Amino acid sequence: MRLCTFEVSTHLGRHSRVGAFRDGRIIDLNFATAWHLSQQGESEPQHLANALAPSSMLEFLRAGLRALHTSEQLFGSAGPHPPDWWKLETPPRGPNDET
């Protein structure tokens, strides 16, 4: 898995996020983790995702192997459904209906 950083614009300004570059796309690992946890019925998916796969590169690296393993699971057979979810035409919706 190739890690990268990218920026998103919000009403609070620009924020740097951690992503994985896969099949020509950048996947927000924190968002994808929260989405996957939401699929599994987790009651606080974003809170748990912030601990498992932090959104800033520095915090992601501090989390070490836990963050890397959590992120790799997103692309394995135990990951979100449908398989190859990151290739869908319409992006997944987050636990708070964000894209």
Image (spheres, helix red, strand yellow):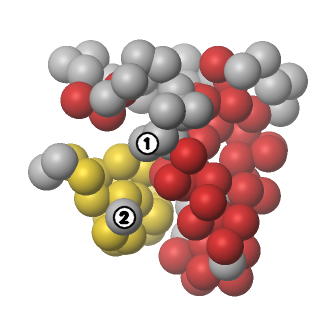
Residue 88 seen in the current view = yes
| Pointer 2 residue | 1
Left or right of 30: which side holds 59? right
Task: Assess disc 1: are there few (<14), some (14-19) or many (≥20) residues with their C-alpha within 10 Å of its C-alpha.
Answer: some
**Which residue is drawn at the image coordinates 25% and 21% (left, top)?**
88
Q: Residue at x 56, y 46 (%)?
A: 73
Residue occupying image coordinates x 72% and y 21%: 40
Work out whether residue 87 or residue 49 is closer to the camera in this orientation and state it: 87
Q: Decide: few, some or many residues near mark 2? Use Cα within 10 Å; few <14, some 14-19, many ≥20.
A: few
Quadrant for the C terminus in the image: top left
Task: Please indicate whether residue 48 sits to the left or right of residue 83 in the image.
Answer: right
What kind of residue is marked 2?
Met
Q: Give x and y (percent) for residue 45.
A: 75, 34
Q: Quadrant of residue 4?
A: bottom left
Residue 28, above or below 53: above
Residue drawn at the location 63% of the way across and 53% of the way down: 70
Residue annotated with mark 1: 75
Q: Quadrant of the N terminus?
A: bottom left
- Label 1 to label 2: alpha-carbon separation: 10 Å
Compare residues 71 and 38 and report the one nearer the observer.
Answer: 71
